[in-house]
Amino acid sequence: MIIGGCSLGILLTAAACIICYTWKEYKNLSSPKSQVSKRHIRRKESFGEKSGSSGMIIFEGYTMDFDLEDLLSASAEILGKGTSGVVYKANVEDATTVVVKRLKEVSVGRKEFEQHLMVVGSIVHENVAPLRAYFYSKDEKLMLYDYYTQGSASALIHENRGAGGRIPLDWETRVRIAVGAARGIACIHGQSGGKLVHGNIKSSNIFLNSKHYGCVSDLGLATLIAPMTKPLTQSGGYCPPEVTDTRKATQASDVFSFGVLLLELLTGRFPLVKNGDDIVHIVRWAHSVVREEWTAEVFDVELLRGPHSVEDEMVEMLRIGMDCVVRVPDQRPRMVDVVKMVESIRRVKPGNPKTCRDKKVVQELPIDIP
């Protein structure tokens, strides 16, 4: 009887252990994390090694039909490198094309990083490139954007100059770039009680949206990245004198950078041009030409081949640009006023301020990263 009772107890205990183990395995296999971890990973070099454990944070209005592992294993093309990191064009398995910015030298902690991106990701405006999602871990900080097929303002102004087959950038498109960028920056300046700053306005961060208007990208990264050692050189001539000294971007410095963009659109020149051993800044060059009353020498030769009826509009945009790049920050116009000025060049229908609104985080996609 004793042996029989012990045997029965052992059998019951073993049966209970088997049932518990089977139930645990069933729950694990049913969980999203387990499903993701069982996916086949094709390793690529583009985004480096995967590490840590976290999730993609996805903002309202964006349907993400892929996960972080799909993104990390996607084929990618480097679009550019800057002070804030490397930009990739990634083609995910289902033929979705996105832009991924891989940040480097992030100077803030996780809490401040996420708080700032919550503000950035909440902005909805047709002239501000939306932050679709982001990922934060100890070793990787990624930001996800839409891919703009028409390219950046920088490429449209400068690419293939002097080469056969180049299609000159017409005046109509240049005005649309200026109007859209101005509206986008004004929307940004209206956020967070009027305290939000872009900090890195330049033609390579302005893209054409579906309506062929300028659309501002890379919002707010200057706040997250360690200060530049050589701001004027590394920002390609868009940086105003006061930021060169203090390394602190302001809304007035955004206005200066926008003024440089206007001069770039008008002249077809890069903001910094090497002349022998000297580097000539577009602002100083434009001042010297205008001072000598050779205003026509300022304008891009591609524009001078166009209709003469737009010369008055070009002169008006030059005046706005020169107002934006005055040396004293307090003497620069506010961005909301600049919008009205550039809209008046072509009598463009004013933008609707109500289109600048907030959205929220709608999903956190959990994932385990081996």
Image (spheres, grey):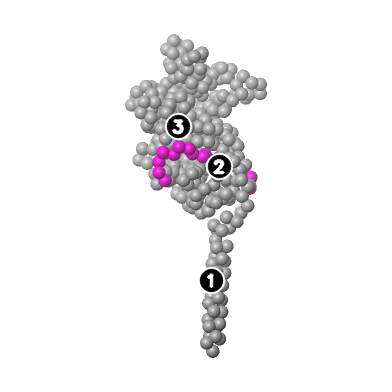
Asked if 99 appears above or below 335 in the picture, the reply is below
- Hey, what amino acid is under mark 2? Gly
To which residue does mark 3 refer?
Answer: 200
What's the residue type where badge 3 is placed? Answer: Asn
Q: Residue furthest left?
A: 330
Residue drawn where x is 42% and y is 28% of the image: 229
Residue 197 rendering spot, x and y as whole percentages: 40, 35
Labels 1 and 2: the sequence-earlier one: 1
x and y percentages locating residue 323 in the rendered image: 40, 22
Q: What's drawn in magenta, residue-wise?
A: 94-110
Disc 2 secondary structure class: loop
Report the residue at 55% width, 25% height from top. 157
Residue pictured at 54% horizontal, 79% vertical: 10
For label 2, the crowd category at 10 Å Cα-Cα, with few meaning under 14, some 14 to 19 and many 20 or more, is: few
Mark 1: secondary structure: helix
Query: What is the quadrant of the N terminus in the image?
Result: bottom right
Where residue 22 sits in the image (x, y, percent)?
57, 69
Residue nearer the viewer, 358 or 249? 249
Residue 348 lies, with reference to residue 103, above or below; the image says above
Inspect this view and state whether residue 316 appears.
no
Q: Quadrant of residue 228?
A: top left
